[in-house]
Image (cartoon, grey):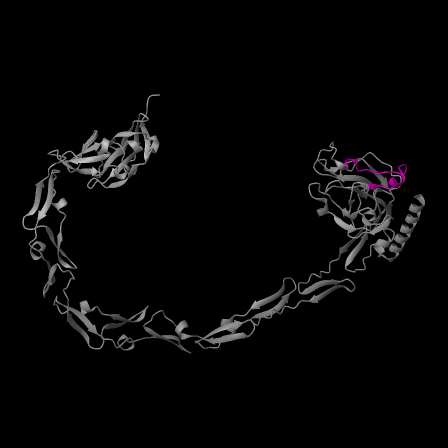
Amino acid sequence: MGNERMIHRTLHHLMIAGLLVTLTPLVAKAEIRIVTMTDPQIVNVSRKVGVGGRLLETNENFVEDTIWVEAWGLQLDVPETSQDAEFRTAHFHNASSPDWHTIQHGHGVNFVGDFQGFFVEMEDGSPFSLRSLDYRLLNTGGLALTSDIRLSTFVDPLLPYEDQSTPFPVVSDPAFQTLNITGFDNVTRVYISSVLGPIQDRMLWDNIVLEVGCDLADPLACDDMNVCTTDVCNGGLGCSNTPISCDDGDACTVDACDPILGCSNTPVNCNDNNACTADSCDSLTGCVNAPLDPAVDCDDANACTVDTCDAILGCTNTAIDPAVTCDDANACTTDACDAALGCTNIAIDPAVDCDDANACTTDACDAILGCTNTTIDPAVDCDNGDACTVGACDTLTGCFQTAISCDDANACTTDSCDPVTGCLNVAVDPAVACDDADLCTDDTCDPVNGCTNTAFDAAVTCDDANACTADTCDALIGCVNTAVIPCNPNGDMTAPDALAFGPNGDLYVASVGTHEVLQYDGLTGLFVTAFVPSGGGGLVTPGGLVFGAGGDLYVSSTGTDEVIRYDGTTGAFVSAFVSAGSGGLVAPSGLTFGANGDLYVTSSGTNEIMQYDGTTGAFVIAFVTPTP
């Protein structure tokens, strides 16, 4: 192993010597430093490369040929004391180790994104250029697997190392290989690592070649062959090539520098390619492009042209459009232009220039609108004072009159016309004009169809509010109310409960046993009708009833836990005013409207008085609650 290393180092140094012969004077005079990594002497001072335990410090470091070399590891975010902290052991080996450990090596990667390796920097912190390194693949289970060697000048432990390092492809060969490196010039630190396969894989390193500084004794050490730079050698810090200044202090020259010929000061071209400027140059301020005055320099003594200057064509004299330029904003003038006088505006004659040959228009001219031909109003301008005629106009002959029609399309009026007052439409009396001598019809007049004689419903029209009579009609006699035997005068009232007088004076009774509301004559007590038939609107066991301010009837339906609203005139179902169980309502009974217009209902099942909005029936509050 020792002989192989010596031969390899000799060949490597010969290659470097050949390389130095072909490089520029700067490289030829630079100093070469090499890390051989043979028997490294470990020191106990770390460069503090990381924080937080992710870019690990190991104290495995040494100095060779004034170059600091330190091992480093990058791991997943796990405690350093954990058995999974794979890279807590990143380190070097020396010659006393077994044969395959005599060169520093990198341990394989256990987890994707984990790396280890070492970094190099000059002991005094000065810049250097990394030129090459030797590597050899080794593993204990056969041919090693690898993808590349990775280099970087900075490592952020919070970001993936692959994303912040430069890959260099390698050769999968068990013999040492030389990797020539570009792109790492004038740097102060380089991290070196590799992407390996299984845990037993190793990457062995040797002969890391660094190029440092320049030769102060050689005046050409930093010559960049460019006469436009000042070349200085800064010893260990390397060369600097500072651009020179070719400024001659004249704003009328273009100052430049050619790497071979040196400075040049070429007169500037102040031509702005604008025919409307006078071009010159001032040595202090540079080019001056003074604009011409078109009103003076381009004047053609013609009041009917616009004198301007075009940047390409020069002076232009464009004839004006009198309709636009001479427009006096008066549509009743003719606008023109005279070469000597300029714009002229002559008034038109409306009777001639605005005549539209229409006897039914008034011809005039408006300063803004121009000619106007206003159509006359025949009803006013052609009126002859007769209310039974209407004025009209013929475009050729002018005004004339036509008789009006007084037909109002109403079959129930008599139509005529008075010359002074106009149309008369007198309504007929249906009782006289439409009488068909039948006492059992309603005689009316329809504006479209004329007289109508409609047989009425005797049960309604002839109703005497007596449930014990049969109500009919005779064409000659009229209504007939015949006694009926047998008769049910109380309407089958069963278990009557709540009752209330309606707006019409009749008495309304809740018949609990028949689930209906019965109506009785308010004066005689005679049965009138089942105002709300059994179960009407879902009524089950009516418990209370009240008429609202609008005349509608409100009934508590004890069996369905709701309050139902009915039309106060017909008894027709309107709505479930308080929906079933609203606000916790159970077995509602008595109900009344308060002074505020809200509805109050007894909830027998909960021993409460409930308050509801008197307009919408929405639950407001449990107005009276039981004692706790």
Q: Is residue 496 above or below residue 460?
A: above
Q: Position of residue 15 (x, y in %)?
A: 89, 53
Q: Locate residue 391 relative to residue 318 in the image: left or right.
A: left
- Position of residue 517 in the picture relative to residue 272 (left or right): left
Q: Quadrant of the C terminus?
A: top left
| Residue 92: in magenta span | yes
The span shown in magenta is 87-105
Look at the image and say whether residue 543 sits in the magenta stretch.
no
The residue lying toward the viewer, choosing from 472 and 61, is: 472
In the image, farthest residue toward the front = 486
Within the image, what quadrant is residue 484 found in?
top left
Q: Position of residue 105 (x, y in %)?
A: 83, 41
Q: Is residue 284 left or right of residue 556?
A: right
Q: Which residue is nearer to you in this view: 545 or 297?
A: 545
| Residue 222 seen in the current view | yes
The extreme left residue here reads: 477
Question: Which residue is painted at 81% across and 57% down in the image?
Answer: 224
